[in-house]
Image (tube, grey):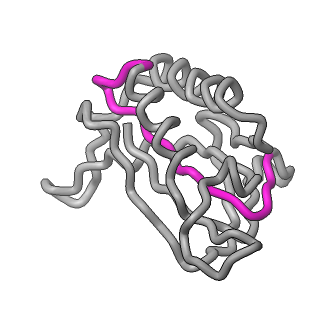
């Protein structure tokens, strides 16, 4: 499992001209499911994401001392199978490492469920498998690539 985490001032995702998810002050997560991933991979990354200290405390000027739960930010999750695109051969990426659609959707839904179980943050998400338009305003910018280690 691979995630591109971006700390944002705000972010939204639109499907067919309609906003389906929108947050302010939090994380935009672009989530890719590998063909060898399991629920354990989601568990690992949810724990990591919720514990990462990327926010400053309003009471202090210290940098990166609070995690998103302590800060009370929002999370917007967008499925992004293209993160496993392999461009080493030719000019068209291969997505053979991405999970098949049914497996990917099940793990995507499990990932969302796991976040809901672990915290009561404002959680929004895109529409799995849809063509989406994602808008964001980076904060920092802070962008991290996280991997569960299965791939």
Q: Residue at x 50, y 43 (%)?
A: 31
Q: Residue at x 81, y 45 (%)?
A: 20
Image coords of residue 56 (percent x, y): 64, 71
Residue situated in front as seen by the camera: 49 or 23: 49
Read off the magenta span: 21-39
Image coords of residue 62 (percent x, y): 58, 78
Kindly give the residue lying farthest to the left in the view shown: 89
Kindly give the residue lying farthest to the right in the view shown: 18
Q: Residue at x 45, y 18 (%)?
A: 103
Q: Is residue 148 magenta?
A: no
Q: Is residue 46 left or right of residue 60?
A: left
Q: Is residue 38 magenta?
A: yes
Image coords of residue 104 (percent x, y): 47, 25
Up-down: is 24 above or below 131? below
Q: Residue at x 55, y 64 (%)?
A: 54
Up-down: is 106 above or below 122? above
Image coords of residue 26 (percent x, y): 69, 59
Q: Quadrant of residue 78?
A: top right
């Amino acid at each position: 499992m691979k995630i591109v985490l971006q700390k944002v001032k705000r972010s939204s995702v639109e499907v067919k001209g309609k906003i389906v998810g929108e947050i302010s002050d939090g994380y935009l997560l672009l989530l890719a499911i590998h063909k060898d991933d399991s629920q354990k991979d989601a568990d690992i990354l949810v724990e990591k994401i919720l514990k990462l200290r990327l926010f400053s405390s309003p009471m202090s000027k210290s940098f990166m001392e609070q995690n998103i739960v302590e800060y009370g930010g929002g999370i917007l999750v967008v499925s992004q199978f293209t993160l496993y695109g392999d461009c080493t051969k030719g000019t068209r990426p291969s997505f053979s490492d991405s999970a098949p659609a049914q497996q990917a959707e099940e793990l995507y839904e499990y990932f969302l469920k796991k976040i809901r179980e672990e915290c009561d943050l404002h959680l929004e998400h895109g529409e799995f498998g849809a063509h989406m338009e994602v808008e964001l305003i980076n904060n920092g910018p802070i962008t991290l690539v996280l991997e569960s280690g299965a791939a």
